[in-house]
Amino acid sequence: MKITVIGAGNGGQAMAAHLSMLGHEVTLHTRNEVKAKVLRAIGGIRLVGRINGTGYVSRYTSDMAEAVTGAEIIMITTVANAHRDVALKMAPYLSDGQIVVLNPGRTGGAFEFRRALDDCRFSRRIFLVEAQTLVYACRIIEDGLVNIVGVKENVLAAALPAADTDKALNRIREIFPCFHPAHNVLETSLENIGAVFHPSIILFNAAAIERGEKFYFYRDITQGVVRFIERLDAERLAIGRAYGLTLTSARDWVSMAYDHIMGDTLRERMFNNPAYYDITAPTTLRCRQLLEDIPTGFVPMLEFGRLAGVETPLMESLLPICSTLLDEDFRTTGRTLEKMGLGEMSFETLLNKVK
């Protein structure tokens, strides 16, 4: 199968190498031509950890036309902040029948991507899919060498509209059997567990991070922070119920995404998850756990909550605190309903749009 991976960061290099190892013809796109040249010179991308081997990617390119043309499936692994820009750059080269997958969409990724295509007066028939999370827990050791810490066993995915989900997933599951259909992209968006985990852990460890103290992001978590996370998560679950969705709690998600996770509590499951065990905290507050998870996770989640009339006092309090901490107005820079093309839409109209 001809597959293009857009984005050559942790997830992009891991996915491109793994799919190459599985025998697919893979193109890896990076907007950075210097990085493309480095990867070409290296030749193959070596994976270590849960997956071991070298994937020989067919093509490394910084040319979007070259990357997109002729691909059957296009896997987007960039940070979610880049989804609109990627859509605008891809639009001229997409063709009928191509499957485009956001890995992951975070919250509202498919809506923002589709809005960008609409702004280009895009009319071709593609299948736009939003994955709830990235298949791999991984870290680049250096370009061309990636440590696969864990591989998820269950990844929810849905197309926009949901009527396209079965047809798209039938094709995607040929390469990723771990993909399972969600009801719609509201479910994949609201199952964005990172938006609950990441900002909370950063916030309550902000001073330690600024002092340069090293700690393990998940397994050093305290009971008080876990209690905060679970109450914050209760607001996410309430938003889901308002949209007719029975979402998975943060505690249950850890043992659903990864097999054989022992423990009764969220804290125990975090501690016992091999994929989480050696992940260290970021060394700066200006990290993706805030700069990505707040504007593309937390903000749109709040927006969906407000549209459904759900009270979310903890979410409402956390957003201005994080904005102040980073001196950035996330309400302005984040994914609002307007930026997702939903600004004038009623609750009922939105439910009809995702069907």
Image (cartoon, grey):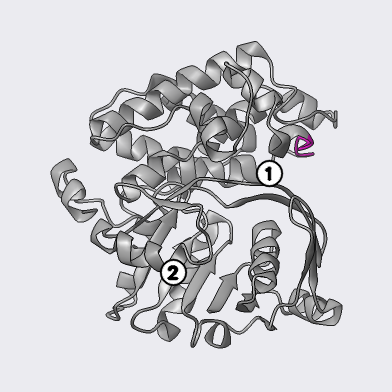
Q: Residues within 10 Å of mark 1 (few under 14, many from 20)?
A: few
The answer to whether one can see residue 113 in this image is no
Q: SS class of the residue under badge 1?
A: loop
The numbered dot on residue 100 is 2
Q: Is residue 23 above or below residue 320?
A: below
Q: SS class of the residue under badge 2?
A: strand
**What amino acid type should be assigned to the residue bearing mark 1?**
Cys
Q: Which is nearer the eye, 69 or 212?
A: 69
**What amino acid type should be assigned to the residue bearing mark 2?**
Val
N-terminal of the pair, mark 1 or mark 2, is: 2
Judged from this view, the residue extending furthest toward the top is 224
The answer to whether one can see residue 347 in this image is yes
Instruction: Report whether 236 appears left or right of 350.
Output: right
The residue range painted magenta reads 278-283
Is the stretch drawn in magenta largely helix, strand or loop?
loop
Q: Which is nearer the eye, 12 or 211?
A: 12
Q: How many marks?
A: 2
Label 1, label 2: how far apart the Cα atoms are: 27 Å
Q: Residue at x 29, y 57 (%)?
A: 341
Q: Residue at x 37, y 27 (%)?
A: 237
User: The C terminus appears in which quarter of the rendering?
Assistant: bottom left
Q: Is residue 303 above or below residue 89?
A: above
Residue 30 coordinates in the image, percent (x, y): 66, 73
Q: Residues within 10 Å of mark 2 (few under 14, many from 20)?
A: many
Q: Residue at x 50, y 82 (%)?
A: 71
Instruction: Report whether 244 appears left or right of 75.
Output: left
Instruction: Report whether 350 appears left or right of 9.
Output: left
Residue 152 coordinates in the image, percent (x, y): 59, 46
Contact, mark 1 vs mark 2 (Cβ under 8 Å): no
* Residue 223 lies in the magenta-colored region: no
Q: Residue at x 53, y 66 (%)?
A: 175
Residue at the spot of label 1:
287
